[in-house]
Amino acid sequence: MKRFTKLAAASFAVMLAAAGAADAAGKVTISIGGAACLCYLPTVLAKQLGEYEKAGVDADLVDFKGGSQSLTAVLGGSADVVSGYFDHTVELAAKKQILQSFVVYDQYPGLVLVVAPGQTGKITSVKDLAGKKVGVSAPGSSTDFFLKYQLKQAGLDPTAASVVGVGLGATAIAAMEQGQIDAAVLLDPAVTVLQSKHADLKILSDTRTQKDTRAVFGGDYPGGSLYTRPEWMEAHPEETQAMTNAMVATLAWIHSHTPEEIADKMPDNLVGPDKAAYLAALKNTLPMYSTTGLMDPKGAQAVLDVFEAGSPDIANAHIDITKTYTNAYVEKAKKAE
């Protein structure tokens, strides 16, 4: 089975070369904010299923430690499209940098605020995180945004906890178990792996289901999507449509197959050595995946509301949230079906 390899810092020049080739018809470089995370599974699975090729696009997937780094690749021109969390588009809009989501694959964010095993019984609420070290995938990523939102909701300063970048997979689990951090914002499969090893694992906040997401945010809240600069989409409408078609087809495939069948299609190095834990995590994650690929306007507005509540700069930016996404490509894909 073809392996999905992480981009090493030394090979960054290779990615730059690939980006140059991205201008060729049908060639696209997609930067991912942590491919081991199940939140990004649809992007990788589409490659494994051959859906990008079927749709007429040659997709080159490049993996990064966190969403902020994958976003930087697109802003810097070394990648074409981000596979990352929609909320980044809101933060950038406040800085007058418009990026636009064109297909949503996570209808819920799947973020989970977890207490490190060594801190069980000592940290029992978000308020207890003041002065503690909390792991996030990378500073400035969606996991970091989520932590700051949780701290503010608990009546604390958003910077009350020290943020430590630990990634999303094995490195995050190791940091938790070795006591390098006191808590972390994780996603599956890391959460389920920890739960399988530590039965008393304390979860402070969970957004893997509609019920939990609404309890945290007061409504639905979109997570992962494919997004990029509007001018890139205008210059590459066929590639944008092809990626959308591939993602819509992949979401349909996910919801018509078993977790075992989905796991069998994923690269071995992303599944990891404990396939049972991966399957358990996947079963927990399945409700998170969109069934349509469409952005819910109310969900997009909820993201803006959360950011405006936590950031005066964003509140004062008077962002038009409708400019941060489009459903046109998904609607066209649906018509083609």
Image: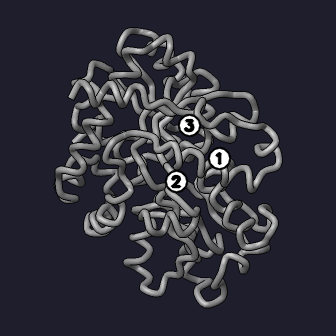
What amino acid type should be assigned to the residue bearing mark 1? Leu
322, 238: nearer the viewer:
322
Question: Spatial distance from mark 3 to mark 2, Cα to Cα?
Answer: 21 Å
- Mark number, residue 304: 1
Question: Spatial distance from mark 1 to mark 2, Cα to Cα?
Answer: 10 Å
335, 95: nearer the viewer:
335
Residue matched to label 3: 70
Question: Spatial distance from mark 1 to mark 3, Cα to Cα?
Answer: 21 Å
> Measured from the top left, where is residue 104 in percent x and y?
43, 41
Judged left or right of residue 130, residue 104 is left
**Residue appearing at x 52%, y 38% in the figure:** 8
What amino acid type should be assigned to the residue bearing mark 3? Ser
Quarter of the image where the C terminus is located = top left
Viewer can see residue 107: yes
Q: Is residue 13 above or below residue 95?
A: above
Disc 3 on helix, strand or loop? helix
What amino acid type should be assigned to the residue bearing mark 2? Tyr
> Measured from the top left, where is residue 49 in percent x and y?
22, 37
Of the residues under marks 1 and 2, which one precedes in the sequence?
2
- Mark number, residue 78: none
**Residue appearing at x 68%, y 60% in the figure:** 164
Disc number lying in front (1 or 3): 1
